[in-house]
Image (spheres, rainbow, N blue to C red):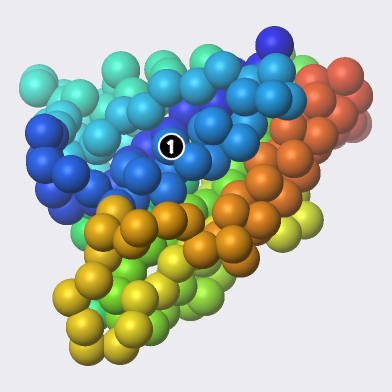
Amino acid sequence: MLRALVLNCTLKPSPAESSTDLLAQQVLDALAPHDVTGETIRVVDHDVKPGVEADMGDGDAWPLIRGRVLASDILVFATPTWVGHMSSVAQRVIERLDAEISETDDEGRPLLAGKVAVVAVVGNEDGAHAVIADAFQGLNDVGFTIPSQGGVYWNGEAMQTTDYKDLDETPEAVATTTETVARHAAHLATLLKERPFPAPAS
């Protein structure tokens, strides 16, 4: 059984409804048939300090979230689009993950190298492709492996107010892409668990 963790980077604290949460949950639901269990952390509900260290000191909630990341096989990085970019919460998560670049396992492999990351983006403005590209780059830099077609997004009509959570049904293209993301993520995570990346030569 594989484990997935959603880091929901919405700007809306609980219990507010979140389109980002809806799409992320759909990814978790699509992972379930592939023997993947999952949980969600809404990052804005926690006091994640700014910085690029694993622990930024007194009151920092990141160390507990980091523990959940390290315990998972698949990270679902979910963010809304704001002003054409990922949310400030999502950017902070990437910055905090930067501390993992120097962390290695007992054989010298990057600590996150055996983990898979996928990205889910929602917004009623353009920018999803750019957000996914930025997220892929940051997540890959810190060690995550990105599967083929590892991103899913929904963009509403430009300059309108309809949110993803307001739709009567999930668009077929989004549902199909979500299933592909889940299938590829579970497959890759299984492979990496069975055959980890080779350790560096000593």
Q: Residue at x 16, y 30 (%)?
A: 46
Q: Quadrant of residue 99?
A: top left
* Quadrant of the frame with the C terminus: top right
User: From the viewer's perspective, is 195 left or right of 97?
Assistant: right
User: From the viewer's perspective, is 184 left or right of 80?
Assistant: right
Q: Residue at x 32, y 43 (%)?
A: 21
Name above or below for residue 94 compared with residue 27. below
Instruction: Give the SS element for disc 1.
Output: helix
Q: Position of residue 79 (x, y in %)?
A: 35, 55
Q: Is residue 187 visible?
A: yes
Residue tagged by mark 1? 25
Name above or below for residue 61 compared with residue 176. above
Q: Residue at x 40, y 74 (%)?
A: 155
For label 1, count other residues whose C-alpha is less than 10 Å away and answer few (under 14), some (14-19) or many (20+).
Answer: some
* Quadrant of the frame with the N terminus: top right
Q: Quadrant of residue 80?
A: bottom left
Q: Position of residue 177 (x, y in %)?
A: 65, 57
Q: Amino acid at mark 1?
A: Gln
Q: Residue at x 10, y 21 (%)?
A: 58
Q: Is residue 196 visible?
A: no
User: From the viewer's perspective, is 6 left or right of 20?
Assistant: right
User: From the viewer's perspective, is 73 left or right of 89?
Assistant: right
Q: Quadrant of residue 83?
A: bottom left
In this rendered view, identify the residue nearer to me: 100 or 133: 133
